[in-house]
Amino acid sequence: MAARLQTLLALPLGSLRVRFLERGRAVPRGLLEAMEEDPRAGARALAEAIRERRATNRAEGQRLRHLLRFETELWEAGHVHVAGVDEAGMAPLAGPVVAAAVVLPKAYKLKGLDDSKKVLDPDRRVELAAAVKRDAVAWAVGRAEVEEIDQLNIYHAGLLAMRRAVEALGLLPDFILVDARRIPQCPAPQRGIVHGDALSASIAAASMIAKTTRDALMAEYDVQYPGYGFAVHKGYPTPQHEATLRSLGACPLHRRSFAPVRQALGLEPEQGSLFQTSPA
């Protein structure tokens, strides 16, 4: 063992960094202690960085185990297919509301998985959504269109999109976890969890797929309806969007039951902005 440690310590520090920090390979017993006693400052700094990475990984593992507490309870009760359901696009002035339903494998852990609102990097959200789609037992999306939002109101349109996502799964879940609501006409038992997208891995996975699916749709609509900036603000009531709405008027994508849109059209208010104005 001592000879192997000496061989490793004789390697360039850059090689050790790539092997044990960047690639995350198992560190032989005693190597960190030897590096911490190494006269080279770079060796001591690398040992500290490896220990910090270990601590970060342990904390992430604990977070992900905690994120599975609702699913674990249901799995242990005999529910094999547990679906998480969430939506994106309740607050925007334009575009559909999109929901996703996801059935994760038992004990599934995906590093970085969280409520999509907490993952600020759009590219990282796309990566996480792609990983969920690749690994999921089943996943599907459902939509409620602008006309349905105006007819039903945004709350019930969101529930409709959720129901459509569940129906599109291709399997009947044994149990459904929903972010803060209950889906009407749902064929499986369900539980609404307040702030569920931050507390349940399945709901977080659904939120990631719903968010990235809707963002991609709004980027497509930006080409179809140029000048409104849909690819940037995704239809949310940002100052830029509201200013453009006043100058260009509403397009077919705008929700005419929402107060800012009705004001731009010179109509009396109907639905107010009941939800947060930042992208979700």
Image (cartoon, grey):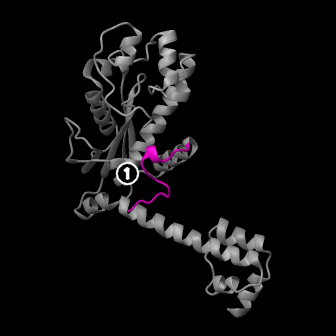
Q: Is residue 154 visible?
A: yes
Q: Residue 100: where, in percent of width, then height?
A: 38, 39
Looking at the picture, does residue 121 appear above or below residue 161?
below
Report which quarter residue 41 is drawn in: bottom right
Q: Residue 207: where, in percent of width, then height?
A: 40, 43
Q: Magenta stretch containing residue 82, yes or no?
A: no
> Which amino acid, mark 1?
Ala
Outermost top residue: 266
Which residue lies at the image location 51% right of the left edge and 28% below the top edge?
A: 233
Which residue lies at the image location 32% right of the left edge and 48% below the top edge?
A: 195
Outermost bottom residue: 2
In the image, taking residue 43 as reference, residue 271 lies left or right, namely left
In the image, taking residue 86 as reference, residue 248 lies left or right, namely right
Q: Secondary structure at mark 1?
A: helix
Which residue lies at the image location 31% right of the left edge and 29% below the top edge?
A: 274
* Disc 1: which residue: 198
**Foreground: 58 or 243?**
243
**Foreground: 101 or 125?**
125
In the image, taking residue 196 as reference, residue 182 lies left or right, namely left
Which residue lies at the image location 51% right of the left edge and 10% below the top edge?
A: 248
Local crowd size for mark 1, using a 10 Å CA cut-off: few (<14), some (14–19), many (≥20): many
Report which quarter residue 257 is drawn in: top left
Q: Magenta stretch containing residue 119, yes or no?
A: yes
Looking at the picture, does residue 225 appear above or below residue 74?
above
Q: Residue 183: where, in percent of width, then height?
A: 23, 38
Q: Quadrant of the N terminus?
A: bottom right
Q: Which is the main secondary structure of the residues drawn in magenta?
A: loop
Q: Quadrant of the C terminus?
A: top left
Which residues are the magenta region?
106-121
**Foreground: 47 or 150?**
47
Looking at the picture, does residue 6 appear above or below residue 44?
below
